[in-house]
């Protein structure tokens, strides 16, 4: 089995192997980030949050437990089917393309954990920010949490093997044509699988240009999940607050 002709995220994210490879992600750190973020934005109890590219809904569920009315959207039908088991009166999940406006408005729209820059069509990246603008109410804030490409490229591990649940995932990383690329290959029951992750290497300056085109205003920039100041060379994250 090789890569699907669909865009890479549409095929890779819908496989069980994506979730196996990344099952050890630090969700406690993510929860601290969301605690800090919601406190910083001063979102009122019961306020409405849209979680863009929510995956299986783990972070949406946590935000809902904090007292927020949360809608999670994702392009992966399998992920949303999984997430729907957690639905309640104030937690909803839907399949939706984040580059198109969702027909509601929110106190905050979160695009977390480098869930941006997937599209090969540059216009879709701009349209995603335009859609976030359309989804914000008069007092709402947009948040994009992206990797700091300067730090990532400087510290790039070109190749390693990660073994999870008895599967050896060979990961090869490179920077090519303005993208940070990870080629992932592994064998399961004698069948070879190959997938690729491609994320546009957007810098802060690139985002500032997109924000200007989309008609939104950058308010704050942070460099980690504790909301420390952003430093171009040393920060691990690029967290942008805008409206």
Image (tube, rainbow, N blue to C red):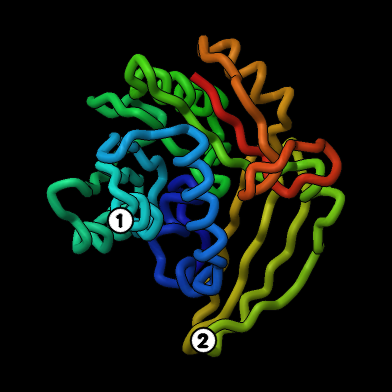
Residue shown at 56% from the left, 14% from the top: 217
Residue, x 69% and y 33% (percent of image)? Answer: 202
Residue 100: % across, % down: 35, 27
Q: Is residue 179 visible?
A: no
Disc 1 + disc 2, Cβ < 8 Å: no
Residue 173 marker: none
Residue 214 position in % (x across, y down)? 51, 14
In the displayed structure, does residue 230 sit left or right of residue 80? Answer: right
Residue at image point 55% right, 49% down: 113
Could you tell me residue 136's position as x and y percent?
36, 22
Q: Is residue 141 above or below residue 215?
A: below
Task: Count neighbours of disc 2 (C-alpha within 10 A) and say few if under 14, some if 14 to 19, many if 20 or more.
Answer: few
Residues packed near mark 1 inside 10 Å, few (<14), some (14 to 19) or many (20 plus): few
Residue 49 vertical placement versus 181 (above, below): above
Estimate the x, y position of residue 194 in percent, counting from the top left. Answer: 57, 66
Comparing marks 1 and 2, which lies closer to the viewer? 1
Disc 1 secondary structure class: helix
Q: Is residue 148 left or right of residue 38?
A: right
Report, in whole angstroms, how far the alpha carbon at label 1 lies from the one at label 2.
30 Å
Q: Which disc, if any, is residue 165?
A: 2
**Upstream in sequence: badge 1 or badge 2:** 1
The structure residue drawn at horizontal position 53% and vertical position 56%, both measured from the top left corner, is 32
- In this figure, what is the number of numbered marks? 2
Which sits in the foreground, 58 or 220? 220
In the visual, does 161 lie left or right of 4?
right
The answer to which of 194 and 28 lies nearer the viewer is: 28
Seen as rendered, the residue at the extreme left is 89
Q: Nearer the viewer, residue 194 or 112?
A: 112
Q: Name the residue beneath numbered marker 1.
A: 65
SS label for mark 2: loop
Q: Is residue 217 visible?
A: yes
Direction from residue 72 to residue 167 in the image, left or right: right
């Amino acid at each position: 089995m090789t890569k699907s002709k669909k865009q890479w995220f549409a095929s890779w994210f819908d496989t069980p192997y994506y979730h196996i490879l990344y099952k050890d992600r630090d969700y406690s750190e993510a929860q601290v980030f969301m605690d800090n973020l919601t406190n910083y934005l001063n979102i009122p109890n019961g306020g409405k949050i849209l979680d863009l590219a929510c995956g299986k809904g783990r972070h949406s569920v946590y935000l809902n437990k904090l007292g927020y009315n949360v809608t999670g959207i994702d392009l992966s039908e399998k992920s949303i089917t999984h997430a729907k088991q957690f639905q309640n009166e104030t937690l909803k999940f839907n399949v939706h393309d984040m580059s198109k406006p969702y027909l509601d408005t929110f106190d905050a729209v979160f695009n977390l954990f480098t869930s941006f820059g997937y599209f090969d069509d540059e216009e879709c990246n701009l349209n995603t920010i335009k859609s976030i603008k359309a989804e914000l109410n008069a007092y709402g804030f947009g948040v994009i949490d992206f990797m700091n490409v300067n730090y990532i490229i400087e510290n790039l591990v070109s190749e390693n093997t990660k073994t999870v649940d008895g599967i050896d995932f060979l990961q090869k990383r490179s920077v090519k044509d303005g993208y940070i690329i990870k080629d992932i290959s592994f064998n399961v029951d004698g069948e070879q699988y190959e997938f690729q992750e491609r994320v546009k290497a957007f810098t802060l300056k690139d985002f500032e240009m997109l924000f200007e085109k989309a008609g939104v205003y950058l308010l704050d920039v942070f460099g980690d999940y504790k909301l420390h100041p952003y430093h171009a060379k040393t920060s691990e994250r690029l967290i942008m607050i805008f409206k």
